[in-house]
Image (cartoon, grey):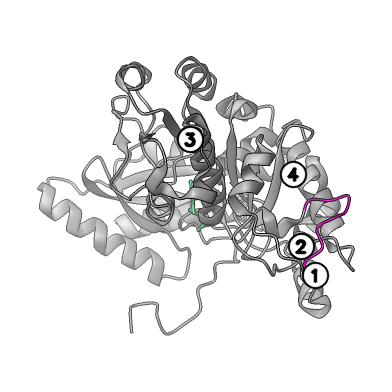
Amino acid sequence: MGIYGDQYTRSTGPRYFGFVTGGTTPAALAGDWLVSVLDQNVATERHSIAAYVEAQTLNYVADLLRLPSAEFHGILTTGATAANLVGLAAAREWCGEQGGMSVSQQGLCSAPAIAVFCAAPHSSIIKDLGLLGIGQRNFKAVACLTDREVFDLSALERELAACEAPGRIVIASAGTVNSGDFDDLVSLSQLCRRYNAWLHVDAAFGAFARCSDRYGHLVEGLELADSITADAHKWLNVPYDCGIAFTRHVALHERAFSADAPYVPMEGQLPAFMNRGVEQSRRYRALPLWMTLKAYGKSGYRSLIESHCDYVKAIAQWIVDSSSYTLLCDIRLNVLVFRHEPQDSSYGTRQELNRQLIRRLNESGEMFITPTTYRGEFALRLSISNWMTRSEDVDRVINAFRTAAS
Ligand SMILES: Cc1ncc(COP(=O)(O)O)c(C=O)c1O
């Protein structure tokens, strides 16, 4: 068994800072219990109010993200991996249409060439490209700006100008998981329009910066995307599993996922959610999200997000002022990458001491953080997205860092 493999992770607690992991608000938890009690199948609107709740929840999320709900149509998925799959399946369908065919109907063998452009894609995107038959390795890795995880727009423009494939998909990030970096979505959408490419934005956690006037500028232009991924089980603090997929091309989206059967009546006022995602039978995952959005509202989520970003900045400032640690990336939102800087140590020793330090920190019970590789070197990574985290937790983190490095 691994080092933590014989116990549960306190991932719902205030000092769990691994990956980008949300906790569970009380309202969401109550909703989740009800979901199992009610056990609705949200395939269509037939026989249940649950589909109405999902439709309304999607409107609430669009409103929270300042997206025009009349233009964006969506579905709740199992997570961001599935939401990326939904967005990219719609994109693939659009690519087929550029060659006058339907990929969902006729298959990839008769599809026109599809070119995919990525800068710093999340691993779930790579997985989805494999699942969609495009191929995990079949994307153009466009250069990033120096020391950033975002598209070098000039490099992307050169690639798009030289591209002969009729189907083109640009995959952008609004919040890279490694360092919380944001693509310039306004410029990307202009390039996509000029070169007739579909713009998919993986905004799994970064989308929620739009709740705040202080951070919304990072995700300016999200409303210009063709498809968008967000993850409610991250910063909205609902229990697993709950992702969100939006596209502005509902007909293409539904064509990619529809397989009608005579025994499933489709008439009605609402979308048949089973025709917008992978599953036919679907969990009532809208209810916890609906309840938490109703309970805390836009202002509740705005203050949650802003306080998390303030806490990350406070820790980053302590690191900058400390002689034992180095801050490795600019702080944009809620992600912090850093390393311990032992005096007079070689590269190899430094890596080993950082490995030991993260083990000590996590074993202390004071916090949980996860390692990463940043600019080729072992580094430590912390992100805050739990509703229970308070400024006292920040003080405990700083104390633990101080003790661990002494
Ligand atoms: C940017 C980004 N995209 C996609 C994912 C995958 O999300 P999930 O684990 O919900 O499928 C993550 C998870 O950390 C992420 O940060």
- Amino acid type shown at disc 2: Pro
**Between 395 and 27, which is closer to the camera in this rendering?**
27
Percent position of residue 175, x then y: 49, 39
Q: Residues within 10 Å of mark 1 (few under 14, many from 20)?
A: some
Kindly state the secondary structure of the residue where label 4 is placed: helix
Q: Nearer the viewer, mark 1 or mark 4?
A: 4
Q: Is 355 placed left or right of 347 in the picture?
A: right
Report if residue 243 is visible in the image. Answer: yes
What residue is disc 4 on?
61
Q: Nearer the viewer, mark 3 or mark 1?
A: 3
- Amino acid type shown at disc 4: Val
Q: Which residues are magenta?
A: 264-271
What residue is disc 2 on?
288
Residue that appears at 46% across and 70% down? 365
Q: Nearer the viewer, mark 3 or mark 2?
A: 3
Q: Is residue 331 above or below residue 122?
A: above
**Between 137 and 11, which is closer to the camera in this rendering?**
137
**Between 209 and 153, which is closer to the camera in this rendering?**
153
Q: Is 369 placed left or right of 326 in the picture?
A: right
Distance from disc 4 to disc 2, alpha carbons, whole Å, reads 13 Å
- Amino acid type shown at disc 1: Ala
Residue that appears at 69% across and 40% down? 250
What residue is disc 3 on?
95
Percent position of residue 61, x then y: 74, 44
Q: Quadrant of residue 336?
A: top left
Q: Earlier in the sequence, mark 1 or mark 2?
A: 1
| Disc 1 to disc 4: CB gap under 8 Å | no
